[in-house]
Image (cartoon, rainbow, N blue to C red):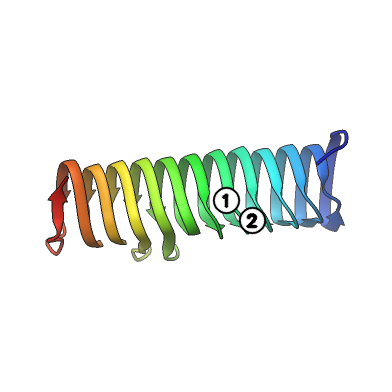
């Protein structure tokens, strides 16, 4: 994207606007950006869509935001739903709702109360998920600290499904996986794990996990 950075893009109600470079983007209602966008700050209250790539340093969504292609940024705060049609790269994502991506997601921190749906690899330094509202899945999950819980006083427990989960410190509840591999591994209630490999410690509340070995 080229050209000078415009001071502000503000959409109130319904509207469609061109992509470009902006200092601040604010969408209240229903707004569409018709091309690639780059912004220092962006806030969506309602429903927004970017028909291209998005690079946003600080992103806040209250409602629903759909990015047709890849998304990159620094800090993202989601209350509702973020749908990305490409890869996601950021430092920190906090979500009360859902993060959905058709490709790989690379983050330093991901804290979610809700769920995820990631078709590719989730590569994250620190992952904390409290599964709520709907099932979650990821192709593979790799990280340093991985905590998956499913705790709510008012709703039933939901499942996270992944092919492989690999990390340094791992705690899992209500998770289905073919392989879990880590340094310290703890399996909580409601899990269906085909195979566990651990380097230092392994504990499990699930007596059905028989294939666990130290490597």
Other-residue count near label 1 (Cα within 10 Å), few / some / many at <14 / 14–19 / ≥20: some
Q: Is residue 71 among what the camera can see?
A: yes
Q: Position of residue 97 (x, y in %)?
A: 52, 55
Which element is circle 2 on?
Answer: strand
Quarter holding residue 69: bottom right
Q: Earlier in the sequence, mark 1 or mark 2?
A: 2
Mark 1 and mark 2 in contact? Answer it, CB < 8 Å. yes
Q: Position of residue 127 (x, y in %)?
A: 40, 44
Residue 115 numbered tag: none
Tell me the residue at 27%/53% (across/down).
180
Q: Position of residue 165 (x, y in %)?
A: 33, 52
Tell me the residue at 73%/57% (across/down).
49
Tell me the residue at 68%/40% (across/down).
56
Quarter holding residue 156: bottom left
Question: Hey, which residue is sitting farthest front in the picture?
Answer: 215
Q: Is residue 150 among what the camera can see?
A: no
Which element is circle 1 on?
Answer: strand
Horizontal placement of 167 versus 32: left or right? Answer: left
Q: How many marks?
A: 2
Quadrant that contains the N terminus: top right
Residue 79 numbered tag: 1
Residue 63 numbered tag: 2
In the image, is residue 106 above or below residue 68?
A: above
Tell me the residue at 32%/48% (across/down).
166
In the image, is residue 114 above or below residue 60?
A: below
Spatial separation of the CA atoms under disc 1 and disc 2:
6 Å
Quadrant that contains the C terminus: top left
Horizontal placement of 180 versus 108: left or right? Answer: left
Q: Position of residue 82 (x, y in %)?
A: 60, 55
Other-residue count near label 2 (Cα within 10 Å), few / some / many at <14 / 14–19 / ≥20: some
Q: Nearer the viewer, residue 54 or 133?
A: 54
């Amino acid at each position: 994207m080229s050209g000078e950075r415009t001071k502000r893009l503000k959409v109130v109600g319904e509207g469609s606007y061109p992509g470009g470079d902006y200092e601040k983007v604010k969408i209240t209602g229903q707004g569409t950006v018709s091309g690639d966008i780059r912004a220092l700050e962006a806030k969506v209250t309602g429903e927004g869509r970017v028909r291209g790539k998005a690079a946003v340093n600080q992103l806040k969504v209250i409602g629903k935001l759909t990015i047709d292609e890849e998304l990159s940024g620094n800090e993202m705060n989601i209350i509702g739903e973020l749908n990305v049609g490409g890869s996601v790269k950021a430092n920190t994502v906090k979500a009360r709702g859902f993060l959905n991506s058709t490709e790989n997601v690379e983050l330093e921190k991901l804290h979610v109360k809700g769920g995820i749906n990631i078709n590719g690899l989730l590569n994250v330094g620190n992952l904390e998920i409290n599964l709520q509202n709907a099932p979650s899945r990821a192709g593979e999950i790799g990280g340093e600290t991985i905590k998956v819980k499913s705790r709510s006083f008012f709703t039933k427990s939901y499942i996270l499904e992944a092919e492989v989960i690999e990390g340094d410190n791992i705690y899992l509840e209500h998770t289905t996986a073919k392989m879990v591999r880590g340094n310290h591994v703890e399996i909580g209630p409601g899990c269906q794990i085909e195979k566990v490999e651990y380097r230092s410690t392994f504990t499990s509340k699930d007596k059905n996990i028989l294939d666990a070995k130290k490597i």
